[in-house]
Image: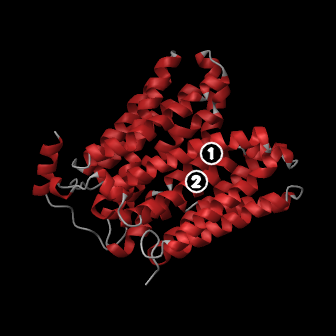
Amino acid sequence: MNSGLASSSQQVSSPAVSERLPWTGLLALAMAGFICILTETIPAGLLLQISTGLGVTEAMAGQLVTLYALGSLLAAIPLTAATRGWRRRPLLLACILGFLVFNTVTTFSSSYLLTLVARFFAGISAGVLWGMVAGYARRMVPEQLKGRAMAVAMTGTPLALALGVPVGTWIGDLAGWRNVFGILSLLALLLTVWVLWKLPDYPGEAADKRLPLHRIFTAPGVRPILFVVLAWVLAHNILYTYIAPYLTQAGLTGQVDLVLLIFGITALLGIWMTGIWIDRHLRLLVLISVAAFALASVLLGIGTSQPLVIYLAVGVWGLTFGGAATLLQTAIAVAGGKSADVAQSMLVTAWNLAIGGGGVVGGILLETTGVVTFPWALFVLLVLAFLIAWRSRTHGFPSEG
């Protein structure tokens, strides 16, 4: 099947590239990311309802997030590599239909085991989707607009975190958790029509151009980028996962929603600023973002008794992390060259490892040294990320000009 698709891809030329941003197509990709992230994270806001509805403990209900992440982690590299000869739009549609099917199963399932299976396969759809979205967006525009196109395509992620999760939780409280997953299925159905109507198709990677996985992994710049992903995203997830305990010890127990709102709003501002400057100043943006997040972690460490300092630090955290996905995906797309989609799948794997690692490392710190050490653990990770990015001036995060 792959060889037939690859052969077809060599015979059919790609659509002409516009000199302006193709907003309808890029926003379709953003919607795909929105559905993907919201499908992953919404169980956290509906945990009590899900546990009651499926007759399991809250800890067991939490495994709906774990199985989704596991599916993404296991699928990203092998399935992206296996499907790199497929035409892009049919592959994207297959991922979107995956969300449609498996969110529908979750909507109607009364079996905990069946729900876990559905979540695992939804995660597989996500792993493949994230491996191709960045490359898809970059192929739709000329060289000078590639970074900006990716910034638009990535807006679904902060929107899902800043608005989707609280709104989804509110709908769940009003209408029940199953209806939230039903709405996600409806969104996937609408997106399918949107993609068929407005998104151009592109050929996959020709068989004679496909590099082995180890060649892509050892390509100049790929490994430094993956290390920065691990360190930066691990630091973020330690804090994001355990923000409630941190705020509790700071005397802000009832302010979790406000703090996450500040983070979400500033993250949206961060991705907007990234879109403006990424095509000219990617390296500088990465270095400033990591350094400013490190500074924010210091403020969180020394300002635990000062709410205004914490709000300021969270604002800086959101501002610097909002564009992280776009910056890192752009960097690895450039480093991966013709094999950008497979390189992206490696980034997806590293990102999911960091998400899981944030829960594990943060949990160990919480049980041993306490939340007061969180900011300093973040600082160490971010200094390491900064040093690697700084040294990768030739490949990975090359100097501008």
**Crowd band around label 2 with a 10 angstrom C-alpha radius: few (<14), some (14–19), many (20+):** many
The correct choice, above or below, for 252 with respect to 186 in the image is below
Q: State the image coordinates of residue 400 (x, y, percent, origin top left).
A: 46, 81
Dot 2 corresponds to which residue? 233
Q: State the image coordinates of residue 243 (x, y, percent, origin top left).
A: 73, 46
Q: What's the residue type where badge 1 is placed?
A: Gly
Q: Which mark is residue 79?
A: none
Q: Which residue shows up at 49% across the image and 18% down it?
A: 113
Dot 1 corresponds to which residue? 358
Quarter of the image for residue 180 reads top right
- In the image, 153 versus 367, the foreground residue is 367
Quarter of the image for residue 78 reads top left
Q: Secondary structure at mark 1?
A: helix
Q: Which residue shows up at 67% across the image and 64% down it?
A: 293
- In the image, 22 versus 304, the foreground residue is 304
**Crowd band around label 1 with a 10 angstrom C-alpha radius: few (<14), some (14–19), many (20+):** many
| Labels 2 and 1 touching (C-beta < 8 A) | yes
Q: Is residue 359 left or right of residue 392?
A: right
- Residue 318 seen: yes
Q: State the image coordinates of residue 369 (x, y, percent, origin top left).
A: 79, 44
The correct choice, above or below, for 74 with respect to 54 in the image is below
Q: Earlier in the sequence, mark 2 or mark 1?
A: 2
